[in-house]
Amino acid sequence: MTHELVLKNGRVIDPSQGIDRVTDVAFAGGKVSALGDGLRGRTERDVSGLIVTPGLIDLHTHVYWGGTSLGVDPDEFARKSAVSTCVDTGSAGPGNFPGFRKHVIERSTARVLVYLHISFAGIYAFSKNVMLGESHDIRLLAARDAVEVINANRDVIIGVKVRIGRIASGPAGIAPLDVALQVADETGLPLMVHIDEPPPSYEAVVSRLREGDVLTHCFRPFPNAPVDGHGKVKPEVLEARRRGVLFDIGHGMGSFSWKTARAMMAEGFAPDTISSDIHALCIDGPAYDQVTTLSKFLALGMSVSDIIAASTVNPAKAVQRPELGTLRPGAAGDASILELRDGSFALEDSRGEFVTVPQRFIAAGLVIGGRDVGTGPATVAAAAE
């Protein structure tokens, strides 16, 4: 077989296959065509000294650029962060999803998958000057419309999104979750739930979730942290994990705390998936991008392999796309090229706490559909000496 592109001599880390070794990865026909030593192709790129992983999946992004005020350009973000798949989480609802599909999803080089919001227009009022929780008004909860749009777009819609909390749902409280659960049940799809400040409580929300549902912002700060005042994981959180609920970081503007993260990791509660929750108000900090978010977990003691798993095979399972998140021959021809750079780097959380770390990931390249699409400029914050 003639390989079209070969990434040579990289440290290939593919947790889906238990691989961590220096070898080559080849692509042809938009798929992974081989993994092994001495592969040859029409185009070869030497990636010696770099890490090659399955294409990174960012499970929580907002990439309805131009259609919502919080959207960022998916291709710019993908190249900057070596992300091959952006999962948009509720930017669009059933009322404006057709524009999202036509003007962004179908034109993007990066793969875009969607958790459809149950609110008719998705997250429609999120900016520096206007911030209105879309779940406040239960008149906007569009269950019938959501089911119709999901059934017509199952190639890209992989789940249902709802936002709950004092900021997102306000006087409606936990009621939007009832509607979202019915839509998820009717369509047979998983649910992703945002939780912000109480009411309702973190415990009340997570107790309602089912196996395969995702609780995002899982390392958020007080109030509504997953740990109590003594740093112990709340019993409802532990029970939800036993039940099969998935816990996602969703860093964003206000949803990752070093204090909470240290407590959770000390209790042995690592996230299932690590995501950036990138949007217009956090792309210049504190989230920046996916590789910066991943780098924070080096400082928290996660192994490189476990961090890569949390952005490849684990989110692929969450969105039920087994062809993603792996470098098995025949899988989608996506790969991320990363540098694990030594130095002194200051990484901030959403409360303004900086932690100086000796290593971080840098985006060094990206392959989507077997094609080298390059990389954009990385954002690297170096700590003052």
Image: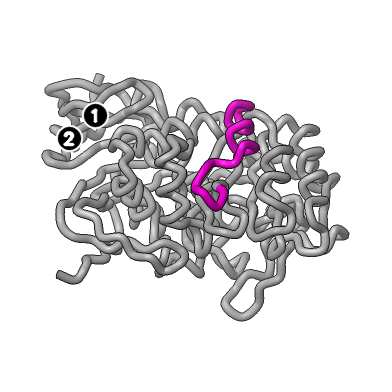
- Quarter of the image with the N terminus in it: top left
> Given the image, on which type of amino acid does mark 2 rest?
Gly
Residue 377 visible, this orientation: no
Q: Which mark is residue 10?
A: 2
310, above or below 177, in the image: above
Please name the residue shown 81% across and 44% down the image: 178
Quarter where residue 211 is shown: top right
Q: Is residue 8 left or right of residue 268?
A: left
Instruction: State the separation of the CA atoms marked 2 and 1.
Output: 8 Å
Please name the residue shown 50% across and 55% down the image: 277
Q: Is residue 124 left or right of residue 179?
A: left
Quarter where residue 77 is shown: bottom left
The percent position of residue 282, horizontal first and vertical second, equals 47, 66
Nearer-N-terminus badge (2/1) = 2
The percent position of residue 99, horizontal first and vertical second, equals 66, 58
- Quarter of the image with the C terminus in it: bottom left
Tell which of 3 and 385 is nearer to you.
Answer: 385
- Is 237 in the magenta? yes
Q: Secondary structure at mark 2?
A: strand
Q: Dot 2: within a 10 Å radius of its alpha carbon, few (fewer than 14), some, or many (20 or more) residues? A: many
User: Which residue has dot 1 on it?
Assistant: 25
Q: Which residues are magenta?
A: 228-244
385, above or below 226, in the image: below
Tell which of 219 and 375 is nearer to you.
Answer: 219
Please name the residue shown 47% across and 39% down the image: 271
> Given the image, on which type of amino acid does mark 1 rest?
Val
Tell which of 254 and 152 is nearer to you.
Answer: 254
| Mark 2–mark 1 CB contact (< 8 Å) | yes
The percent position of residue 350, horizontal first and vertical second, equals 46, 64
Quick one: which residue is furthest to the right in this view? 139
